[in-house]
């Protein structure tokens, strides 16, 4: 995908080019490969320095797989990932180690992502030890990290199970920013937390972004959270990108029927407004056997014959070069 005019004056820090990730499906006594789950299927986009790019979609759309592929937790089936123009696939082990200081990930469940057998001090010391930071300097930096995320120094001697969910996520955030990364992938960072705690964690992320100049790829199924956090938004469905636009345009002028359906599914307090909504019907098709043409065609209320035959490419929508929609018949203004 070419860089849009919307971001022409910004510097891309991360480029995703035709990324594909298929998981094999096996069966039988000898576990022969019988097919593939198309988790991420030909996805391309850029992330620009200092922005928050939100990624939204229903469960199973490929959001988390995308983030894990970028971090190297899953090998790519096809495609390229470039950081500051340099392909990650061409990295030597030494370069990969250096990359880990520039890109980090905050996981959905802080309890599962933290080693239960380690104290907070040991958890935070690990990255400094791997990258050869001296112990006196490490101790000072760890205390500073706790202060940045709003935890008391007394937390250092405790184990993860001694904290609440919000506090554990603060520890996870401290670990992620310990090496002063350029980009942080936030994978559903508040979905496992109580509603009362979510806003505090989101505000912490915003404060850290402002103070450290961080770039976020923010993955979530909650459109209200993404709206609060994001400068631009990617809408995914069944492994493909349906729409990319400025956050305000996504919410005020959605170009893809799927985006509109997601927005109409967000609960509202006004009963009159709720009654005028058209709920999204049907089930998400199998990622092992995705439908031909547009992935959303089987559930789209405005689908035509072309939608079932030809895959739509991302193209300019609403005459805005920064608003791209993969739809043969995008919604009009």
Image (tube, rainbow, N blue to C red):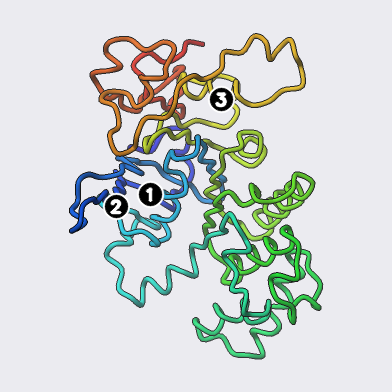
Position of 86 with respect to 29 (left or right) is right
Q: Disc 1 designates what residue?
A: 15
Where is residue 51? Give x, y as percent.
56, 46
Please tell me whether mark 3 sits on a helix, a strand or a loop.
Answer: helix
Where is residue 27? Give x, y as percent.
23, 50
Q: In the rendered structure, are the residues bearing label 1 and label 2 in contact, judged by CB atoms less than 8 Å apart?
A: yes
Please tell me whether mark 1 sits on a helix, a strand or a loop.
Answer: strand
CA separation, marks 3 and 1?
A: 22 Å
Q: Quadrant of residue 72?
A: bottom left
Please, is residue 143 above or below residue 264 in the view?
Answer: below
Q: Residues within 10 Å of mark 1 (few under 14, many from 20)?
A: many
Position of 242 with respect to 88 (left or right) is right
Nearest to N terminus: mark 3 or mark 1: 1
Frontmost residue, 24 versus 157: 24
Q: Residue at x 42, y 19 (%)?
A: 299
Please, is residue 89 above or below residue 38 in the view?
Answer: below
Q: Residue at x 61, y 34 (%)?
A: 223
Position of 141 with respect to 85 (left or right) is right
CA separation, marks 1 and 2?
A: 8 Å
Q: Which mark is residue 249?
A: 3
CA separation, marks 2 and 3?
A: 29 Å
Q: Disc 2 designates what residue?
A: 80
Frontmost residue, 187 versus 134: 187
Q: Residue at x 75, y 14 (%)?
A: 271
Front of the two marks 1 and 2:
2
Q: In the rendered structure, are the residues bearing label 3 and label 1 in contact, judged by CB atoms less than 8 Å apart?
A: no
Q: Residues within 10 Å of mark 2 (few under 14, many from 20)?
A: some
Nearest to N terminus: mark 2 or mark 3: 2
Frontmost residue, 26 versus 250: 26
Where is residue 198? Give x, y as percent.
73, 48
């Amino acid at each position: 995908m070419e860089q849009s005019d919307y971001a022409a004056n910004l510097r891309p820090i991360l480029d995703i080019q035709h990324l594909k990730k298929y998981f094999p499906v096996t069966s039988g006594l000898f576990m022969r490969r019988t097919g593939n789950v198309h988790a991420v299927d030909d996805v391309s986009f850029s992330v620009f320095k200092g922005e928050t790019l939100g990624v939204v979609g229903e469960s199973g759309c490929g959001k988390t797989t995308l983030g894990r592929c970028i971090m190297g937790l899953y090998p790519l089936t096809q495609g390229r990932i470039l950081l500051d123009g340099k392909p990650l696939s061409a990295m030597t082990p030494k370069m990969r180690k250096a990359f880990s200081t520039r890109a980090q990930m905050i996981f959905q469940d802080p309890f599962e992502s933290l080693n239960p057998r380690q104290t907070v001090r040991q958890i935070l010391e690990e990255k400094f030890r791997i990258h050869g930071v001296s112990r006196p300097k490490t101790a000072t930096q760890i205390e500073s990290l706790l202060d940045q995320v709003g935890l008391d120094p007394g937390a250092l001697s405790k184990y993860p199970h001694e904290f609440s969910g919000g506090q554990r996520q603060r520890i996870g955030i401290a670990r992620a920013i310990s090496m002063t990364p350029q980009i942080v992938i936030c994978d559903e960072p508040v979905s496992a937390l109580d509603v009362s705690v979510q806003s505090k964690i989101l505000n912490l992320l915003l404060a850290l972004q402002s103070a450290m100049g961080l770039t976020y790829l923010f993955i979530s199924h909650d459109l209200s959270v993404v709206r609060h956090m994001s400068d631009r938004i990617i809408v995914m469905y069944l492994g493909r990108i349906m729409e990319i636009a400025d956050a305000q345009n996504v919410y005020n002028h959605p170009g893809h029927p799927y985006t509109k359906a997601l927005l109409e599914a967000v609960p509202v307090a006004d009963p009159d407004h709720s009654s005028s909504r058209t709920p999204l019907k049907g089930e998400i098709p199998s990622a092992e056997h995705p439908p031909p043409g547009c992935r959303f065609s089987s559930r789209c209320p405005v689908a035509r014959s072309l939608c079932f035959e030809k895959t739509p490419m991302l193209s300019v929508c609403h005459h805005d070069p920064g608003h791209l929609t993969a739809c043969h018949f995008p919604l009009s203004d």
